[in-house]
Structures are given as C-alpha cells and as structure tokens.
Amino acid sequence: MTTTNPESVPATPVYTITVSVDGVASINGEQVTEEGLDPNAARVAALSEIMIKAALHGRPVRVLAKEADGSAWPLIVDVNGTVTTLETPHPAPPAPVPAQARPAASPHQEAARAQARPPQQPAAAELGSAPSAVPTEWAAPLPPQYGPAWADLVAQEKAGRLVEAIVTAAQLETVLAGTLGPLAPPTVNVMTVRAAFTVRRVEETEDWAETVELLVQTVQCRREAGAPEDETQRLISNAHATWMRLSAEDPEYAHETAEPVLVLLGDHPQNKRRAQAVIRLLERGAAA
C-alpha cells in the first residue's frame, strides 16, 4: 500500500484517538462508538471518522492513536483511508512569530496585510436584506503577525487553488484559536472563509454531509461569538442548499442532520419557505 510522505503533511491539526478496553473510541474527547465493541473494531470506526475529517481538509491529517494500556502511535490518515505509521513523534505546531522578529515585508505583503480581512463570499441565495454596518472588531484586519499566512490564502484562492486555500485557512484558524480563542472575531472570520471555500468545492468533492456539518458548526460559532447576522444568514442559506442536495444523495443521513439545520433556519421570515421544504422532505421520507 502506498504511504504518505510525512514531510508533506502540515503539523496541525492532530486528532487524538483513544480506545478503552470496553470498546469505546473517542476523537479529541468526543465519543464516536458505543460500549461493547471489540477494541480493534472501535479503532477502525474511529479511523473511518478521521478519514472524513481528512476529506473535509482536502489532504492527509495527523493522528495520535492511544491504546488502553497508555501506549500511543503517531499516524497519518489520508483521504482514501491509507494509514501510515510514523517512526517518530509528530512535529510540534509552529508558534506564531512576533511581528518584530519578521524580516521587512515586501510591498505585496504590506498590501496584503492592510487588506487582511475575510473576503465577502457569494451566498447560495440572496436574502434580499439591506447590508448593515459591520462592528469594528469584526471588520478589523488580522493581527500583523498573521498577514503572511493571509496573503498566502488570498493568493491561493485567486489562483483557483481552493484545496490549498482551505488547508491554509484551517492551519491559520487553529493558530488563532490557540492564541486568541476559538470565539475571537479573527478566528471565527477565518473559519467562515474556510466554510465558504468548502462550499465552493462541494460540487466537485460531493462531500455533502461533511459540508453541512461544517456550515452548522460555523453558524453555531458565529452565533455564540455574536458575529454579524448578515454573513451568518448567508451561511445558513448555504447550509440549507447543501442539505437539500444531501437529502437527494443520502436521505437517511440527511434525516439525521435535519434538526440542526431547522434550528439554524429558526423563525427568520426569509427562511420560512426553506424550513417548510425541509419538513416536506422529512414527511415524504417518513411516509415512504
């Protein structure tokens, strides 16, 4: 079986799988199997979940597999399910470099830093509401030390290299979450950009379920962080459109994810018809 070159895989994120003696597998503390499975079967189930996460990132991801006896194995899991066991531990994630420690920026980098704010992404359907003023903390550029990473992301997106842009956004989001917090405006803004880029690729990847989950998580984070509602509603529109496609591709899984989508739609007047469409599909499936 072909293995993945570890040097080509970013240092973050690292997903930690733990398997107990009673067959409960968890990923980063979130339980993914029920008690009673054979530990090997639980491990395989957890790796299947990791494969989905790799597909969402559009590239291999790093894993630390912990056994009940305390032993741990560094792995790399690819989108196609290939598992590579490493002989050495995962590298430590790079720490943000203070701005004063960076070399002088080129004019291109300075321009990118000055404009380092999430670009507006097209919605799946316009809500027709007038744009409102964006609070300063949500419209502000990223802190200067993250300007080069943002410049890379912008360049990748402009060149049509969306997979690379999604990877860069995920890495930047992880660093921002660790330094500023997961609900800080810069972190949530970058997560929003990653979600928007993922939506733009979903017709190609057909990762409908994973994209719905990402959009739901992003909207939930935006709501918890108090982000501007206009952009949040655009993401909700995308979540609904993606769920509708999921209902055609995988009706059973769409039924499982319908509730959080309906919660997102809520009682917003512009979402009334969307919510009704979801309910009709659910009723049609129940009657079948």
Image (tube, rainbow, N blue to C red):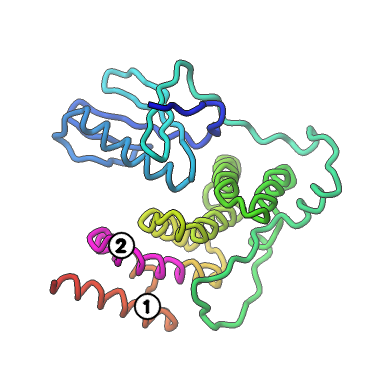
On the image, the x and y values in percent for residue 119 come to 65, 62
Q: Nearer the viewer, mark 2 or mark 1?
A: 2
- Residue type at mark 1: give it: Arg
Q: Which residues are magenta?
A: 236-259
Asked if residue 94 lies left or right of residue 124, the reply is: right
Q: The N terminus lies in which quarter of the figure?
A: top left
Q: Mark 1: few, some, or many residues within 10 Å (few <14, many ≥20)?
A: some
Disc ID at residue 274: 1
Q: Identify the residue shown where x is 56% and y is 26%.
A: 7
Residue tagged by mark 2?
A: 249
Secondary structure found at label 2: helix
Q: Identify the residue shown where x is 38% and y is 21%.
A: 73
The foreground one among 217 and 182 is 217
Asked if residue 234 lies left or right of residue 179, the reply is: left
The foreground one among 286 and 24 is 286
Q: Identify the residue shown where x is 34% and y is 32%.
A: 17
On the image, the x and y values in percent for residue 273 come to 37, 82
| Vertical comparison of 268 with 159: above or below | below
The prevailing secondary structure element of the residues shown in magenta is helix
Q: Identify the residue shown where x is 54% and y is 57%.
A: 197
Magenta segment: does it hold 233? no
- Residue type at mark 2: give it: Glu
Chain-order first, disc 2 or disc 1: 2
Q: Mark 2: few, some, or many residues within 10 Å (few <14, many ≥20)?
A: some
